[in-house]
Amino acid sequence: MAGESEMRDDLTHTADAPSVVDLRSDTVTRPTEAMYARMRTAPLGDDGLDADPTARALEETAAAMLGKAAGLFVPSCTMGNLLAILAQVQRSEQILLEAQAHMLNTERGAATLTGAFLYGVAGTDGAMDLDRLEDALSPNASPLRTAMIALETSHNAAGGTVLPPAHMAAVADLARARGIPVHLDGARLFNAATHLGVAPADLAVHVDTVSLCLSKGLSAPVGAVLAGDGPVIAAARRLRKMIGGTQRQVGIMAAAGLEAITVMGARLAEDHDRARQLSEGLNALRPRLSATMPQTNIVQVDLGRTGRDSARWITDLDALGIRTRPLGGQRLRLVTHRHIAAVDIDRAVAAFRTCLDAA
Ligand SMILES: *Cc1c(COP(=O)(O)O)cnc(C)c1O
């Protein structure tokens, strides 16, 4: 539970009217007071010249928490995933990943920079079908050499589902038998670890490189970390400079990131409780609409029987102070986070009911 002082802190920095319940994304979370305090006092250097000490501290701490030898602070998780590819995959090589993966759905424009082909393998709840993965790995399947397999947990488009560790281990076995590195898009890895009751490193042990987003539920204002072995991260550090991702007194942001990974992971279970509360409240409105049962902090709402599309729902809910985002024309995606309390969930469910009754 957020303490009273924490809630007052949040209000101090609230840009929206306090009456707005913003379920669009966990990226809307604002820095905590402790983050601002660390940012004000962080030792700084020039990270493009001879290293920023706070950025180095974040990189070392994050790498240790992820069980890897080295880490690299990057401006976004998108850049972390891009650098993992640039550092390990050559042009005209292939990356295999689940067909709904963020790296394929949202970040596939990276292919214009990497020259690597992304091939989606059909899966369930974010987990690739292992037989289909093995087929795709067959030398007869494609003239392209597979140079990376990428996983995602929690899986964004699959409704925040968590990959079973046994699945991650099975993919790692298939990859290692062929000398192929495994990358984990772990934008919400701490949510996955929270759901399973394990440490993030217990999941990252199955992969060679992992990216972690600091600016989602962990509440840092910006940034992500890419972690892996020493040579790969050294290569990624050189490539980061090439693509303009090296920043100067970046310790100001790294300081917030340090607070994010060392303190903020512990409260993610609260977001998962809120998401479950939201799902249960919405499913009480069945059969007019239905919601996924979340493992973490993302709930998908099926609007197919309401006779109104997602754009209309977003407008109607917005008028009641509830902000949401579409997932195609017939679904909404709701995300819980630090600024969403139990009373906000009650308000959101009531707003859905009001909209249904007004139809
Ligand atoms: C948000 C997200 C990203 C991208 O993170 P940014 O820091 O916004 O670039 C990558 N992968 C997944 C699964 C995400 O949810």
Image: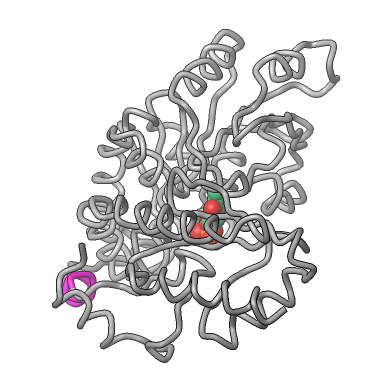
Q: Quadrant of residue 2?
A: bottom left
Q: Split into 4 quadrants, where in the image is the N terminus? A: bottom left
Q: Does the stretch in magenta take in 37?
A: yes
Answer left or right for 88 relative to 22.
Answer: right
Q: Does the stretch in magenta take in 21?
A: no
Quarter of the rendered structure image containing ligand 1: bottom right
Percent across and percent down for residue 76 are 50, 59
Main secondary-structure element of the magenta-colored stretch: helix
Q: Residue at x 47, y 26 (%)?
A: 164
Answer left or right for 191 relative to 252.
Answer: right
- Given residues 310 and 107, the one toward you in this image is 310
Q: Residue at x 22, y 77 (%)?
A: 7
Q: Residue at x 74, y 77 (%)?
A: 312
Percent across and percent down for residue 30 are 35, 74
Q: Split into 4 quadrants, where in the image is the C terminus? A: bottom right
Q: Quadrant of residue 285?
A: bottom right
Magenta range is 34-41
Answer left or right for 240 relative to 228.
Answer: right
Vertical position of residue 116 compared to residue 286: above or below: above
Q: Quadrant of residue 248?
A: bottom left
The colour style of the image is one colour
